[in-house]
Image: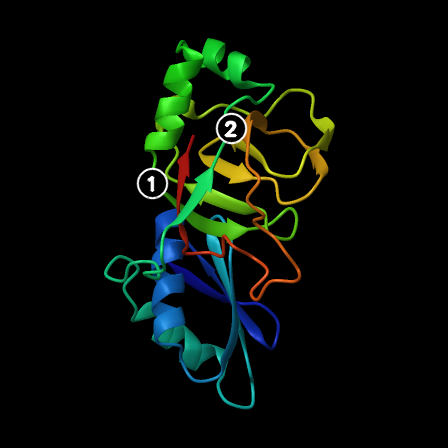
Amino acid sequence: MRVLPYGARAAMVDFDDSSEVLGLHASLTQDPPDGVVELVPAARTLLIRFDPGRTHHDRLAGDVLDRSTVDVAPREAAEIVVPVRYDGPDLADVAAATGMSAEAVVRRHEDGTYVSAFCGFAPGFAYLTGLDPALHLPRRTSPRTRVPAGSVAIAGEYTAVYPNVSPGGWQLIGRTALPVWDVERDPPNLLAPGTRIRFTS
């Protein structure tokens, strides 16, 4: 774990493993150091914005380096169940690429216990860890210009739900009617980092 200055009001914590990001994010969320105003997790980093009137980089870095990234579980929020119709346009291709039947792909995807690691690409687009390694596939060689909102997809080590209509290159295996991003809801993001998720047919 490395803590680097990121301008005058932030520090960037760099990790070797995404699970460490979730551990530190959980620790700092449950017991934030004085002066911390925002935490922004990503695949292998955690950005920590702070108020320079209340703390400084060296003090914050010392606190962060004293934290364990493994002893604190992600927040114990209720598990979000995402109902899915597994009829995505790439399901047959995923089955062929993995050497499984489409039914087996669905079972493997449903059996996973997922955690939202970070959000990016678009508001509410959560990168969910916990995907069965047998389903780790690259993105499509030719991205789509329009992916429907609610599309359930896989790419690399992640699975995700497209929150809105957008371009995208992930493998589409299903769709859900559950709105994962709603600006009229408080908070608008249903799958915030640390949230546990389960998919079900």
Cβ atoms under marks 2 and 1 closer than 8 Å = no
- Classify the position of the N terminus by image quarter: bottom left
User: Regarding mark 1 in the picture, which secondary structure is present there?
Assistant: loop
- 33 w.r.t. 40: above or below: below
- 48 w.r.t. 171: above or below: below
Residue 62 lies, in percent from the top left, at 36, 76
**Looking at this rendering, what residue extends furthest in the right direction?**
145
Residue under the image location 49 percent in, 30 percent down: 156
Residue 165 lies, in percent from the top left, at 71, 39
**Looking at this rendering, what residue extends furthest in the bottom direction?**
53
**Gap between marks 2 and 1, in whole Å?**
18 Å
Residue under the image location 53 percent in, 47 percent down: 126
Q: Nearer the viewer, residue 198 or 41?
A: 198
Residue 113 badge: 1
Q: Nearer the viewer, residue 163 or 33?
A: 163
Q: Nearer the viewer, residue 147 or 119?
A: 147
Residue 85 badge: 2
- 129 w.r.t. 93: above or below: below
- Classify the position of the C terminus by image quarter: top left
Q: Which amino acid does the dot numbered 1 rest on?
A: Thr
Q: Which amino acid does the dot numbered 2 rest on?
A: Arg
Residue under the image location 38 percent in, 70 percent down: 28
Residue 101 lies, in percent from the top left, at 41, 10
Q: Quadrant of residue 151?
A: top right
Residue 14 lies, in percent from the top left, at 45, 56
Q: Is residue 199 left or right of residue 126?
A: left
User: Regarding mark 2 in the picture, which secondary structure is present there?
Assistant: loop
Residue 144 badge: none
Q: Is residue 63 left or right of residue 40?
A: left
- 6 w.r.t. 145: above or below: below
